[in-house]
Image (cartoon, grey):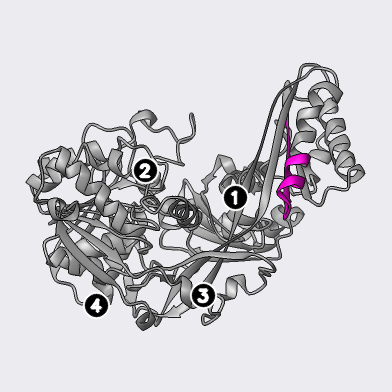
Amino acid sequence: MTGVPLYDIAHSRAGDKGNRLNLSLIPYDPAHYSLLAEQVTEERVLALFRHRGATSCRRYDLPLLHAFNFIVEDALEGGVNGSLNLDGHGKTNSFRLLALEVALPS
Amino acid sequence: MFRLGNGSGFSGDRVDAPIPVMRDLVAGGTPAALFFETLGERTVALAHLEKRRDGELGYEPMLERLVRPILRDAAEHAIPLLGNWGAANPPAGGRAVARVAMELGLPDLRIAVVEGDDVTGQVANGQLPVHDADAGLDMGDWRLVAANAYIGAEPLVEALREGAQVIVAGRTSDPALAIAPLAHHFGWGVEDWDRLAIGAAAGHLLECGSQVTGGVFWDPGRKDVPDPANLGFPIAEVTAEGELVITKPAGTGGVVDFRTIKEQLLYELHDPAEYITPDVVLDITGCTLEQAGKDRVALRGLRGHPRPETLKVTASFEGSWLGEGEVSVAGPNAAGRARAMADVLLERLRMRGLKVKARVDLIGLASVHDSDGGALWRDAECDAPEVRVRLAVESASRDDADQAAREVLAMLCCGPAGTGGARWRVTPRILTRSHLILRERVPTRVAIRTAKEMLR
């Protein structure tokens, strides 16, 4: 097994609704869909945003589109209007997800 | 076939984007419409503040600049322009379009003004329940600025039926701007859920403009996109049978493929089985894609479910201030000096007893991914060639916010070695809260007049 960042095999976009963050995760190669389903769990994604106070994470699977949608609650310290963060929308967080490491069969 | 273009994805988007889209729609020769989405939750609130300052403002500031280059084609080729660019003041937005029409010698241009989304009174009276997502928000001493309901496609369809060539609306939902011209052209009923779902999907994919054609996507060496300086804004092609293809104008940069479509399809989505709009609940769980040519993607398997009984309302409140100050350090040990400066800044706020909530970013080490407490930069051990130190504070007192921000300015003399380039400012903060309202409590009004009549 080889450890690689998600960035090497998948892409992502972040969106927001208030204090709720949404992150898509899309493998470039649909063959990696099940590997991501196994390794990129709700717990691991929540852990990426714990330092900002995130309270829960839910993953929606889209097997026909070969994509995932993660919803992270309370991840934006108030969201676009309430946050002191420069990126109040949290749009850059897709790349925080893409830094997460997964194990690829070598 | 009907072709639906998008000319703007938010207030602040590229103002020349609609030109190639209009050119492509005209060249296509099929029935078409062009819509503009220029409102965010925050944009509405800021527009209300503008309107309070000057009763003839409060509509999209770029409105005239967006429509001027395309208005003649819109009129001559019967391609209606629709937008929520009326923001907090659709009648004033309508007059702005009328003035441009008169300049261009189009006095008979028919302009529709759609109103009724402003439900400030009902929120002020405490009549509306708070949306679950915001149940924990305590508005304390905040003052209500305005509240607007997300209205659906029906008043827009009515305006098109009566011959409107430009529609100036306020807080319509984004997908409604796409659903309306399609429903009008194909004669979809208000309970034709699977057809309306196609309109909602088209609207969702197009509402952020270039985000489906390569914007918020390009990543050199990984996701290369041709000519990002000239991204083509999207066009949806819909047939009477319900085929939906997303594409972009000829001769523009950008790309439309599975990657861009999937990213935008899931953008700001919660449950993929239930994307709620005022006109239909969209379910994309059965959706499949087909590359139908270069920069052409077809979507199939979209389903619609009955629309909700309630509409979402965004209420905006004012009552505190944001103070920000920034200054740079550079060269050897920049990170060490920046970290020390951050601690000294927080110490200064404590010493002076300023009533603020504060955060420090060390831009170059950790900022946008960091917490208010600086969990990441406090742990970052690396150095950086340059670091920009940013202090951000919130306070109910404008003076405290200003004094806190000025502590960054003072670092020009009192700070660590090699400090320079300070900026600081204080701006009012707006908080928003979502409510729900029964749709029958949001009666809408459509008024259509020619440009000439509107300025009389």
Subunit bearing disc 3: B
Task: Tell me if residue B187 can be seen.
Answer: yes
State yes or no: discs 3 and 4 in contact (Cβ < 8 Å): no
Residue at image point 55% right, 80% down: B126
Q: Which mark is residue A90?
A: 1
How far apart marks 4 and 1 lie (CA) works out to 35 Å
Q: Chain of mark 4?
A: B
Label 4 element class: loop
Which residue bears the numbered disc 3?
B123
Marks 4 & 2 on one chain: yes
* In-image side of B244 versus B394 (left or right): left
Dot 3 and dot 2 within a common chain? yes
Q: Which residue is under mark 2?
A: B210
Q: Amino acid at mark 4?
A: Val
Q: CA distance from mark 3 to mark 2?
A: 35 Å
Separation of residues labelled 3 and 1 (CA atoms): 28 Å
Q: Are marks 4 and 1 on the same chain?
A: no
For label 2, count other residues whose C-alpha is less than 10 Å away and answer few (under 14), some (14-19) or many (20+): many
Q: Nearer the viewer, mark 3 or mark 2?
A: 3
Instruction: Pick the residue in front: B191 or B340.
Output: B340
Host chain of mark 1 = A
Q: How many marks?
A: 4
- Secondary structure of the residue carrying tag 2 is helix
- Of B252 and B442, nearer the camera is B442
Residue B48 placement (x, y as % from top left): 46, 57
